[in-house]
Amino acid sequence: PYYAITQSSAIPVTSLQHTLSVYAKAAELTKFGLRLDDTGSSNTLVAGFDVAAGTVDVAAAGTGAVTGATASIVNVGEGWYRCIISGTWSSMAASRAIIRLRDASGNYGSFSGDGTSGMMFYGAQLEPGLIASPYTKTTTTYGSQPSTSIEQNYFLYSEQMQLWNTPSNAS
């Protein structure tokens, strides 16, 4: 099995540039990947992160209709990092974000878990544009920054990862 959580979101067609970010902290595991796709999986944006080293260890890549893929990691203190991927789609009406754990060697593929090892995640945000804006907490509705309706979070439950979905082929 692979170990992942996902959340799907409707994307306004007015924006074809998107940024996905999440705060991460190493625990027993230190590596994970971010993926944003069009729910059909043919147009994807991916990158891998090593939060113990504070690095992007798998360069950002776009497939299908995705261009201009970038990834970055920002140390925000006390072992926490904001991990960010951005890209431009030629078309997109819906999206699926995936946070996928990787084993010690960095493999996304199947690996045997021990039932207790993991990582900490907080504050997932999907927003229009190519720059991660200040984090906007969401619960049961999509959020916007008080100062502007442009900066917004398309996710529900941005801090409650237990309410995200676990794919059927994930554990």
Image: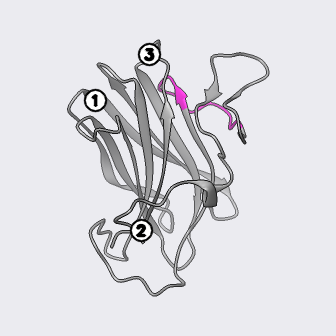
Q: Residue at x 36, y 74 (%)?
A: 103
Range covered by the magenta-colored residues: 127-136
Which quadrant of the structure image shows residue 44? top left
Q: Residue at x 59, y 38 (%)?
A: 155
Residue type at tag 1: Val
Q: Position of residue 53 (x, y in %)?
A: 47, 65
> In the drawing, does residue 45 fall left or right of residue 100?
left
Q: Position of residue 153 (x, y in %)?
A: 62, 32
Q: Residues within 10 Å of mark 3 (few under 14, many from 20)?
A: few
Instruction: Name the secondary structure under disc 3.
Output: loop
Q: Earlier in the sequence, mark 3 or mark 1?
A: 3
Q: Nearer the viewer, mark 3 or mark 1?
A: 3
Mark 3, residue position: 13
Q: Disc 3 versus disc 2: distance between alpha carbons?
A: 31 Å
The answer to whether marks 1 and 2 mark residues whose Cβ atoms lie closer than 8 Å is: no
- Colour setup of the view: one colour
* Of the pair 48 and 96, the residue shown nearer to us: 96
Instruction: Name the secondary structure under disc 2.
Output: loop
Q: Is residue 130 magenta?
A: yes
Mark 2, residue position: 3
